[in-house]
Structures are given as structure tokens and as C-alpha cells.
Image (spheres, grey):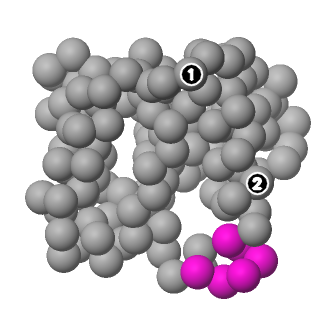
Amino acid sequence: MAFRSRPVALRNQARQLRKSMTPEEMKLWWLLRVLNKQGTHFRRQVPLDGYILDFAEYSHRLIIEVDGSQHGMPEQEKRDQKRDAHFTDAGFRVLRFWNTDINNELAGVVDKILDTLAHPPTGPAGRLPRKGGE
């Protein structure tokens, strides 16, 4: 979900989104918390470079997005592509999962995340985006 606003407002929006996560985001968050106990450090609803990311793990340079049906609309797809390109250029890998993937194929989602974590990103690390859209 992209929000273009001042850094303080962006942080406040992220805080509010943490309180109102979708059921699919909550389900994935509980699994990511288990991974955090195994050495990763996933954050949820992260304000970064003018966007709010569903989940981010900085040391593995991984962003995970959970998409509902609105992300299948042409206008939203273009925004998602622009956003993904922005973070890919900064050295991040972006995984996107549909809500139906979380609800019906959770084991496959977890396998994809684990596989991505097991392989370090290739290419230049790029710069770290500015925190909070500053």
C-alpha cells in the first residue's frame, strides 16, 4: 500500500495499519514471528521511502506484500510495478502473495519465503531507502 505524505504522517499511518491488519496479514505475521525466533528480523507495516510495506526484513533485503483483489486492477498493478522496481533498484527482493495463497496454500508461501531467505540477494546491494519516507 503506497502512501505519499510527510514522514510523521507516514509513521502514524503505518502504526494504524498495524492495528488493522487483514486476516491474511495476521496469519502470515504469526509465521514470520516464528522465523524471527530463528534469526530473522521481520517488521510489519514498515514506512520506507514514502511507502508502507506489509513486511520487511532488512538483513536479507526482502519485502513481502500480501495482495487482495484490488491489486489485480490495471491501475493498481502499474503502481505495484513502479513500487517494486523502486525497491528492486535499491537491492531488495519483493515477494507478493495473493490473499488466496495465504488462505489456501500457506505451506507453499512459507516454502517460498524460506527458499528466498536461504539464497542471498544477487547483484549490488544498492542504497538503503530512507526510513519513514524522509
Residue nearer the viewer, 70 or 30 = 70
- The reply to whether residue 19 is in sight is no
Residue 31: mark in rendering: none
The x, y position of residue 21, in whole percent, is 43, 58
Quarter residue 113 falls in: top left
The x, y position of residue 17, in whole percent, is 54, 52
Which residue, given by chain and number where applicable, does mark 2 sit on?
A: 82
Residue at x 65%, y 49% (from the top left corner) = 84
Residue at x 67%, y 60% (from the top left corner) = 80
Residue 123: mark in rendering: 1
Q: Could you tell me how many numbered marks the image carries?
A: 2
Residues in magenta, as a range: 72-77
Residue at x 58%, y 81% (from the top left corner) = 72
Quarter residue 81 falls in: bottom right
Q: Which quadrant of the figure contains the C terminus?
A: top right
Between marks 1 and 2 in the image, the one whose residue lies nearer the viewer: 1
Q: Secondary structure at mark 1?
A: loop
Residue nearer the viewer, 105 or 28 = 105
Q: Which quadrant of the figure contains the N terminus?
A: bottom right
Q: Main secondary structure of the magenta part?
A: helix
Q: Which amino acid does the dot numbered 1 rest on?
A: Gly
Residue 73 covered by magenta stretch:
yes
Sooner in the amino-acid sequence: mark 1 or mark 2: 2
CA gap, disc 1 and disc 2: 20 Å
Q: Which amino acid does the dot numbered 2 rest on?
A: Lys
The x, y position of residue 102, in whole percent, is 27, 66
